[in-house]
C-alpha cells in the first residue's frame, strides 16, 4: 500500500487544488465530490471516479463499494487542506466531467439557470429539480459552474443523479434557438406576471427559465418566452430568492402532471 499523502507539495495536491477553479476543471476534465454523501451518490450512479482520497483507516469501507477503486490514502490534515468545506469532508473523489453535446435532448421539464452567480443556489436548484423529477438541468454561459465544489456540496448528491447538460454552446441565444427549433414552451418567472404558477396548465414538456434575482433572465429568453408566471405573495415580502422560487415552481409543474 502506498504511504499516506502528507505533503502539500505532492502533485496530487496541486491537481486537487486546481479543481477549485473553472479553468482547472476544464483543463483536467475533472470535478470534486466532497464528503460521504456526494461520493456515495457518485458510486451509486456508477459515475467515473478517477481517484478517491481518504484516510487509511477508511480504505476498506470504500473498497466494499468497488474493489477496483483507485484509492490514495491521505492524512486528515491534507484532506482539510484540499477541501474548502467548513469541516473536514472525510473523503474526496476526483470525478470525470460529463461529455459535451452539440444538441439539446430532454423529456419533462428542463430547468434553465440563466445568470445565477451563486454556486450554492445552483446546487440547491439542482437538488430541487432532482426531487421533483425534472427532466434535465442546464446552466447557461452566464451562470456559475454547476460542477464547482460549493455547487456539488449544495446539491447534496443530486448533481450525480441529475447531471446538468453540457452543451458545446450554452449561450442564452444558442439555448433559445434549440428550444424554439423543438417547439418547446419557454416559461419565465416574473413577479409582475398576471398568471400564477399554481393556476397555469403546465405542459409536460417545457423549459422553465430562472434568472438573476435583480436583473431577471437575459433578453434572449425574455423575448422568446411563451409564458410568464408569478408566485403569489400573500405577506409583505417583496419576493422569494431564486432557489426558493425555483423550488416552488418546479413543484407547481410536478403537481400539474398528476391532474
Image (cartoon, rainbow, N blue to C red):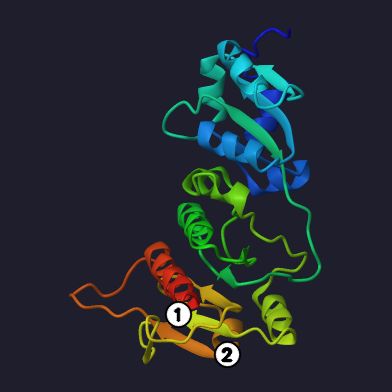
Q: Quadrant of residue 56?
A: top right
Residue at image mark 2: 223
Q: Is residue 96 left or right of residue 211?
A: right
Q: CA distance from mark 1 to mark 2?
A: 30 Å
SS under mark 1: loop
At horizontal 69% and vertical 47% (from top left) the residue drawn is 23
The answer to whether marks 1 and 2 mark residues whose Cβ atoms lie closer than 8 Å is no
* x and y percentages locating residue 134 in the rendered image: 56, 65
* Total numbered badges shown on the rendered structure: 2
Which quarter of the figure is the C terminus placed in?
Answer: bottom left
* Residue 75 picture quarter: top right
Name the residue at 69% across, 76% down.
175
Name which quarter of the figure residue 168 lies in: bottom right
Residue sitting at 63 percent across and 44 percent down? 21
Q: Position of residue 124 (x, y in %)?
A: 46, 55
Which class describes the residues within 10 Å of circle 2: few (<14), some (14-19), or many (20+)? few
Mark 1 burial class by Cα count in 10 Å: few <14, some 14-19, many 20+: few
Q: Quadrant of the N terminus?
A: top right
Camera-side residue of 81 and 202:
202
> Could one spot residue 147 in this view of the protein?
no
Name the N-terminal-most of marks 1 and 2: 2
Specify the farthest residue to the left: 236
Which residue was labeled with disc 1? 259
Residue 196 position, x and y percent, is 36, 85
Image coordinates for residue 57, horizontal then vertical, percent: 56, 10
Determine whether 37 is above or below 189 in the image. above
Q: Is residue 62 above or below residue 211?
A: above
Check disc 2 and report its element: helix, strand or loop.
helix
Q: Is residue 174 above or below residue 31?
A: below
Residue furthest to the right: 102
Amino acid at each position: 500500500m502506498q504511504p499516506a499523502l502528507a505533503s502539500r507539495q505532492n502533485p496530487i495536491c496541486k491537481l486537487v487544488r486546481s479543481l477549485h477553479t473553472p479553468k482547472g476543471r476544464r483543463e483536467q476534465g475533472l470535478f470534486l465530490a466532497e464528503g460521504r454523501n456526494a461520493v456515495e451518490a457518485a458510486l451509486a450512479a456508477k459515475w467515473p471516479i478517477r481517484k478517491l482520497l481518504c484516510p487509511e483507516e477508511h480504505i476498506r469501507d470504500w473498497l466494499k463499494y468497488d474493489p477496483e477503486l483507485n484509492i490514495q490514502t491521505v492524512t486528515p490534515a491534507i484532506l482539510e487542506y484540499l477541501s474548502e468545506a467548513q469541516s473536514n469532508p472525510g473523503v474526496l473523489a476526483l470525478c470525470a466531467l460529463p461529455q459535451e453535446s452539440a444538441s439539446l435532448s430532454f423529456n419533462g421539464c428542463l430547468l434553465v439557470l440563466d445568470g445565477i452567480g451563486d454556486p450554492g443556489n445552483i446546487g440547491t436548484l439542482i437538488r430541487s429539480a432532482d426531487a421533483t423529477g425534472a427532466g434535465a438541468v442546464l446552466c447557461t454561459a452566464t451562470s456559475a459552474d454547476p460542477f464547482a465544489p460549493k455547487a456539488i456540496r449544495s446539491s447534496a448528491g443530486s448533481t450525480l443523479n441529475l447531471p446538468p447538460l453540457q452543451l458545446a454552446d450554452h449561450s442564452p441565444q444558442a439555448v433559445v434557438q434549440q428550444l424554439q427549433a423543438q417547439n418547446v414552451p419557454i416559461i419565465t418567472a416574473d413577479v409582475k406576471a398576471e398568471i400564477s404558477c399554481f393556476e397555469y396548465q403546465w405542459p409536460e414538456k417545457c423549459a422553465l427559465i430562472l434568472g438573476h434575482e435583480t436583473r431577471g433572465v437575459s433578453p434572449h429568453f425574455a423575448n422568446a418566452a411563451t409564458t410568464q408566471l408569478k408566485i403569489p405573495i400573500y405577506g409583505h415580502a417583496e419576493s422569494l430568492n431564486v432557489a426558493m422560487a425555483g423550488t416552488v415552481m418546479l413543484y407547481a409543474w410536478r403537481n400539474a402532471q398528476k391532474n
